[in-house]
Amino acid sequence: MKKGVSFPVTVALMALVSSLASASDPSPLQDTCVAIDEPKDAVFVNGKFCKDPKLTEAEDFFFSGLDKPGNTSNPVASNVTTVNVGQIKGLNTLGISMVRIDYEPYGQNPPHTHPRATEILTVLEGTLYVGFVTSNPENRLISKVLNKGDVFVLALYMCKRK
């Protein structure tokens, strides 16, 4: 008679496999946490106070203006229009933001960091040289020339665009 695997061992193996297969973040405690400046009767989450969810409205998740070019008359010949929790209160705790960057020919966005962030960009018009520098010890430049419609992910904390 063949000996089988005991029930407790089978359950333990299934639990181990199940825990290894789960690689996502835990579920948020609530769907939204619309940021407000007034702390009266609010909950403090992620550096901002949250609006009572019953008072949340469409305007909390809306921004208008990324269709307007920014002023590039400056030393770096570029302009960054930021859309984050400061502009869209509903972005609070979601871990995302968005920007529009306008460049003059040969304009640049100086090297900068994105702590705990990844950037994805799409070229809507023209050509753009993009890249990022890998972490120590290599400090390698990963770069590419992008054309209209191309997408590039700047996956590390340090990114450099020319």
Image (tube, rainbow, N blue to C red):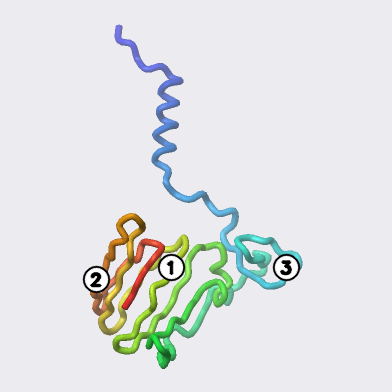
The mark that comes first in sequence, 2 or 3, is 3
Please state which of the two labelled residues, at mark 1 or mark 3, is closer to the viewer.
1
Would you name the residue on which mark 1 appears? Answer: 113
Q: Nearer the viewer, mark 1 or mark 2?
A: 1
Return the residue nearer the eye: 134 or 57. Answer: 134
Q: Residue at label 3?
A: 39
- Position in image of residue 40 (x %, y %): 76, 68
Q: Is residue 54 visible?
A: no
* Residue 147, quarter of picture: bottom left
Distance between the alpha carbons at the discs numbered 1 and 2: 19 Å
Marks 1/3: CA distance?
31 Å
What type is the residue that disc 2 sits on? Answer: Lys
Mark 3 crowd level (few <14, some 14–19, many ≥20, 10 Å Cα): few
Vertical placement of residue 20 versus 118, above or below: above
The residue sitting at the right extreme is 40
- In what element is the residue under mark 1? strand
Label 2 environment density (alpha carbons within 10 Å; few <14, some 14–19, many ≥20): few
Q: Earlier in the sequence, mark 1 or mark 2?
A: 1
Tell me the residue that label 2 is attached to. Answer: 144
What percent of the width, then of the height, locates residue 161? 33, 75
Which residue type carries mark 1? Thr
Q: Residue at x 56, y 62 (%)?
A: 93
Q: Percent from the top left, x then y, of residue 74? A: 42, 90
> Residue 41 vs residue 85: left or right?
right
Which residue is farthest top? 1
Q: Residue at x 29, y 84 (%)?
A: 125
**Dot 2 lies on which element?**
strand
| CB-based contact (under 8 Å), mark 2 and mark 3 | no
- The correct choice, above or below, for 14 with respect to 138 in the image is above
